[in-house]
């Protein structure tokens, strides 16, 4: 006698359901868009944080080169005068001279990597780190600095960084809006697929009801299907989006500047992006369950 | 020990002043009253279109009456929620005239469905289903997909599915219509045995031979109404 197959996966023939293809495509596309948008959201957030930090944490001081020819000692004395001035101020944590090598790196996008910057009359730069939460009176410090070292000036980047932060915040809000749109489209797709499938299998659902199946019993079969389809499709969508992110990162590496460099993804961000298929599968499972119960109430 | 006399005093289906109509069509059944006692056995008779299938549908809780009250196992179904209705349906076995099997599943899986709905373990399901399918002489076809079975085989699968759960009420619409005499006799024996164990049985049939042979009371539908024809007195 032939061996009887003991475990039936589902009384409803959902495996060969035509709605599956629609669900697979829509989930792949949705997760692709969602991952890219979420990555953009994370990058914009880290950029804003980094800019905010630089506003709070410090300022840059420019020491203009002298018009007269000075020897190295005299040049160093001019710099030390400014360093001592800032070290004497309340709330200053650290004052550091930015090296020529770093300046060369900063100028590289404009001058190229082979430029001989020592021969150029470039200003020296001081990076001044402030203690956390320290309020700083830029106006007064600028005036005091002008008195003791008129060749030095504070580069107060707060104003233009604030403008950048405002623009980036708008982009962040836009990306949130796109995330909500993609999520809504996914929910709609699940609803549509479940409703269509229930109409197709209405006669089987009726028989199951007559045999005493609860709405939850039927909904569980759809929830299982929803989980499987969503997990596989969203994994595809996630892999495609990660590839796209690497490609974008590779293409933009040539354009990188100090500002855009702050737009990066940390370990937590990557974990969130990679875990999206699990979230999508759980959401699809829960939504399918809910939709079946709602639709059955209306249908029968 | 519960005696047969005691079993027969407990109402299991109570239909009061019920009318059935579909949409705006005229009533199929009008103002009917029926009280089925636990452990009773009835034939449901009447001409085609008399409302036999509608009355059965109402008894297996797939059709709500347009008017009147239906009480099954002491629960007024008009006020029962969906989960309570599902619980009531699990206590009822139904054999459809057109079988209504799940065509994409095997005979085994079809018969196992009511037990899986009840949440029974697969080992117990295997034991019960194999035993019953052997009894209806389908042990060699149990892994065949239902769409490949003959009419008679499908009918036996449908009957096995209806009785596998040991239902308290068995409602069957022409259950012996597509099988040969030997199998028909065997299936009727199964219904009689279930009835002896306390199952309330209602069989819709056109077969006068069957009614004469088994001599149970009839629920006869005529002119939108219902009358009970008692058992014939055997000479």
Image (tube, rainbow, N blue to C red):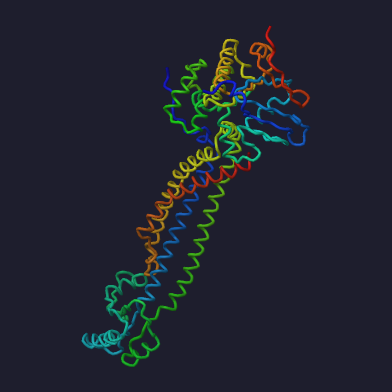
Q: Residue furthest bottom?
A: A147
The residue nearer to you, when weighing A282 against A35, is: A282
Image: B14 above or below A296: above
Outermost residue on the left side: it is: A73
Rendering quarter of residue B173: top right
Q: Where B131 falls versus A30 (above or below)?
A: above
Q: Position of residue A256 (x, y in %)?
A: 38, 65
Quadrant of the rendering where the C terminus of chain B is positioned: top right
Instruction: Tell whether A298 sits left or right of A91.
Output: right
What is the x, y in percent for residue B94?
A: 60, 26
Residue A155 at x, y = what percent? 38, 81
Name the residue at 35% across, 58% down.
Answer: A267
Q: Tell me which corner region of the image, top left, top right, bottom left or bottom right, holds residue B157.
A: top right
Q: Vertically, is A9 above or below A233?
A: above
x then y, percent, for residue A177 = 52, 60
Q: Toward which corner of the image does residue A54 lie, by quadrant?
A: bottom left
- Up/down of A42 relative to A12, above or below: below
Query: Which residue is more in the foreground, B231 or B180?
Result: B231
Q: Residue at left 21%, top 86%? A: A73
Give A40 or A210, whichever is nearer the viewer. A210
Q: How many marks?
A: 0
């Amino acid at each position: 006698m032939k061996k009887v197959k003991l475990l039936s996966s589902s009384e409803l023939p959902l495996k060969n359901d035509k709605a599956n293809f629609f669900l697979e495509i829509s989930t792949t596309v949705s997760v692709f868009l969602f991952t890219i948008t979420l990555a953009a959201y994370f990058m914009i957030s880290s950029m804003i944080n980094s800019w905010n930090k630089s506003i709070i944490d410090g300022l840059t001081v420019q020491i203009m080169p002298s018009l007269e020819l000075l020897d190295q000692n005299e040049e160093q004395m001019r710099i030390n005068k400014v360093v001592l001035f800032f070290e004497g101020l309340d709330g200053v944590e650290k004052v550091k001279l930015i090296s020529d090598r770093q300046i060369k790196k900063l100028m590289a996008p404009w001058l190229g990597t082979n430029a001989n910057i020592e021969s150029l009359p470039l200003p020296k730069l001081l990076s001044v780190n402030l203690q956390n939460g320290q309020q700083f009176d830029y106006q007064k410090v600028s005036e005091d600095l002008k008195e003791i070292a008129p060749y030095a000036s504070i580069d107060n980047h707060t104003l233009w960084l604030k403008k950048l932060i405002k623009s980036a915040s708008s982009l962040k809000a836009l990306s949130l809006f796109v995330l909500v749109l993609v999520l809504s489209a996914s929910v709609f797709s699940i609803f549509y697929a479940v409703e269509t499938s229930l109409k197709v299998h209405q006669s089987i659902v009726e028989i199951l009801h007559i045999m005493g199946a609860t709405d939850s019993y039927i909904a569980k079969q759809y929830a299982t299907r929803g989980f499987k389809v969503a997990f596989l499709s969203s994994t595809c969508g996630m892999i495609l989006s990660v590839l796209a992110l690497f490609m974008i990162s590779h293409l933009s590496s040539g354009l990188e500047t100090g500002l855009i460099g702050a737009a990066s993804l940390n370990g937590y961000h990557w974990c969130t992006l990679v875990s999206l298929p699990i979230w999508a599968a759980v959401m699809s499972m829960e939504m399918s369950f809910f939709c079946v119960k709602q639709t059955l109430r209306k249908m029968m | 020990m519960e005696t047969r006399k005691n079993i027969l005093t407990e109402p299991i289906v109570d239909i009061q002043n019920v009318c059935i109509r579909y949409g705006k069509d005229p009533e199929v059944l009008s103002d009917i009253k029926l009280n089925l006692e636990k452990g009773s056995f009835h034939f449901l008779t009447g001409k085609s279109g008399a409302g036999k299938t509608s009355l059965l549908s109402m008894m297996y809780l797939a059709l709500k009456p347009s008017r009147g009250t239906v009480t099954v196992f002491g629960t007024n179904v008009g006020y029962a929620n969906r989960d309570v209705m599902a619980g009531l349906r699990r206590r009822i076995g139904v054999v459809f005239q057109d079988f209504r099997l799940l065509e994409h599943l095997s005979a085994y899986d079809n018969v196992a469905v009511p037990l899986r709905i009840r949440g029974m373990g697969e080992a117990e399901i295997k034991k019960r289903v194999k035993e019953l399918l052997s009894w209806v002489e389908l042990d060699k076809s149990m892994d065949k997909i239902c769409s490949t079975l003959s009419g008679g085989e499908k009918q036996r699968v449908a009957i096995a599915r209806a009785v596998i759960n040991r239902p308290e009420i068995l409602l069957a619409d022409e259950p012996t219509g597509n099988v040969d005499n030997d199998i028909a006799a065997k299936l009727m024996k199964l219904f009689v045995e279930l009835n002896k164990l306390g199952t309330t049985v209602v069989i819709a049939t056109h077969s006068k031979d069957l009614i004469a042979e088994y001599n149970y009371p009839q629920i006869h539908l005529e002119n939108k109404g219902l009358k009970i024809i008692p058992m014939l007195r055997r000479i």
